Amino acid sequence: QVQLVESGGGLVQAGGSLRLSCTVSARTPSSSATGWFRQAPGKEREFVAAIIVFESRLYADSVKGRFTISTDNAKNTVYLQMNSLKPEDTAVYYCAAGRQMQRYAERYAYWGQGTQVTVSS
């Protein structure tokens, strides 16, 4: 069973930065891609960014140019560097692992527990 553990959430002022980390317990063909999703209160879970082991990247339009996804393959850890944060970025952020780099949450088989990011105005 593949397990994911996120860390790095917190409270930050608008314009600030945070870095989220997601450690994946094992890389298998079914967990070779990692995605970040977020869910704000009363809203559906939405795609943020994704990366696959050969470092192809995918971003949501709302975060392009502000967020950067990267990976340390030796540590099985994926990072989400979030800069120029806005109050609308406030959400619980989840990392997920799956077979392919996708925008769709249902395509990811494994999920972490989530970490809260709050951006104050």
Image: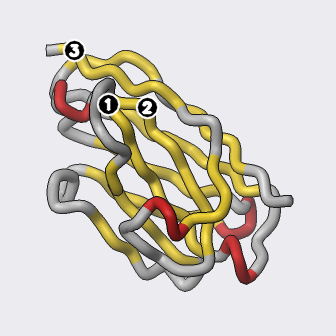
Circle 2: residue type? Val
Front residue of 65/32: it is: 32
Picture residue at 61% right of the left edge, 48% below the top: 22
Crowding around mark 2 (Cα neighbors within 10 Å: few <14, some 14 to 19, many 20+) is: some
Circle 1: residue type? Ala
- Indicate the quadrant where residue 19 lies: top left
Picture residue at 39% right of the left edge, 26% below the top: 117
Work out whether mark 2 precedes mark 3 in sequence or the reverse, and give the earlier one.
2
Residue 71 image position (x, y, % from top left): 56, 64
Work out whether mark 2 precedes mark 1 in sequence or the reverse, and give the earlier one.
1
Which secondary structure lies at badge 3?
A: strand
Task: Tell me the tag on residue 40.
Answer: 1
Task: Tell me the tag on residue 120.
Answer: 3
| CB atoms of marks 2 and 1 within 8 Å | yes
Q: In this view, does 108 lie to the left or right of 65?
A: right
Residue marked by disc 2: 92
Residue 48 image position (x, y, % from top left): 33, 54
Picture residue at 67% right of the left edge, 57% below the top: 110
Front residue of 22/88: it is: 88
Residue 70 image position (x, y, % from top left): 48, 63
Which secondary structure lies at badge 1?
A: loop
Picture residue at 70% right of the left edge, 77% below the top: 30
Residue 45 image position (x, y, % from top left): 37, 45
Of marks 1 and 3, the one in the foreground? 1
